[in-house]
Image (cartoon, rainbow, N blue to C red):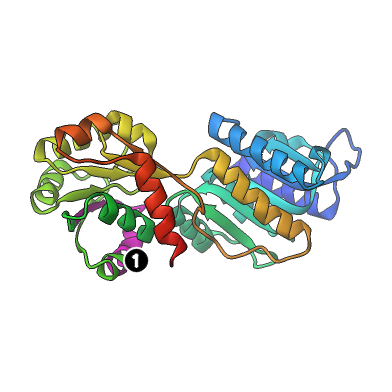
Amino acid sequence: MFGHSLMFRLAVLCFWFGCGFSHGVYAAPVSVLLVSAERNVAFTEAAEVFMDELARTGISRSNVQYLTLAEARTSGTRAGQLVLALGVEAATELARTEMRIPVLSVFVPSQSFEHIVQTAARKAASPFSAIYLNQAFGRQLDLIQLALPQRTRIGVLLGSHSSSQAHLLEEETRRHALSLMQIPVEPNEPMFAKLQMLLDTSQVLLALPDPQVFNSGTLQNILLSAVRAGVPMVSFSPAYVKAGALMAIYTTPSQVGQQAAQLARSVLQGKELPAPQYPRDFLIDVNVSLARSMNLDIDAKNLTERLKRLEATK
């Protein structure tokens, strides 16, 4: 693992200094290099939309290249103006280099990005920014107040990935005049006694993208407990709605690609890469059958329109 990481760092450094790895031939640089650990469905969809959006404004697809980390270690491709890192693994690898061009990370939760920046040995030679995977707390709480105005007590389970953002959530709930119960869960600690305590005192369970808390081994039990307690879950993934959450607010890979292309165009035009930001666009999914069983009248399209109108006034 260390050897692969070191090889990639050396390869990336050579991208910036003009070294070539393709049979000793120096490869022509591309304007934008996309890098990910793998080509999964979400990454590929975002990459295609990203390249299509740039092409629509006159930036040829030949000036944009998409490589996996493994391919980047042996490719002679050199990025000229921007690197787009898709996913936590790619962002982590790129943060360990001392490259001299901007890096924009996507599909990275805000808490993960903060951890990457804090622990990386990377020098501030160029901007290192992100479009976060998760939604801003303000947007999530706005959604709860629009959909569930009578429910003012919000419960959150905090794992090691999300605990650093507890103070931000506390500030947002105060701004929204909501009460908040946050219960920390230590690694390898039995969770369900704490979950029951949280459900006993909360009216809404807000799920944060923390793999210590929400993973394939815990999700069904959390959802079943919440449904039995009559506490709806508001989540960050449409898959959770299918599994039994009441609602999810999330940004699609296409929306990520569009936002990243807008920022990339700005950089290619000579502007600075902006500070890390939350997604601009979003979708809302609603579990209609669960809403009906809880006597809740909630419509996803109507909620989306109302939330967008609310944000437009801020």
Residue 155 position, x and y percent, is 20, 53
Q: Nearer the viewer, residue 215 or 244?
A: 244
Q: Is residue 244 left or right of residue 226?
A: right
Residue at (31%, 34%) from the top-left corner? Answer: 241
- Give yes or no for residue 156 being in the magenta stretch: yes
When asked about the image quadrant of residue 189, the answer is top left
Q: Position of residue 265 (x, y in %)?
A: 73, 54
Which quarter shows the C terminus?
Answer: bottom left
Which residue occupies 15% across, 32% down? 293
Residue 109 screen position, x and y as percent: 45, 51
Q: Quarter-wise, where is residue 124 in the image?
A: bottom right
Task: Measuring from the top left, give residue 127's x and y in whole percent.
Answer: 65, 64
| Kind of residue indicated by mark 1 | Leu
Asked whether the viewer can see residue 236, the reply is no
Q: Nearer the viewer, residue 305 or 265?
A: 305
From the viewer's side, name the closer residue of 58 and 48: 58
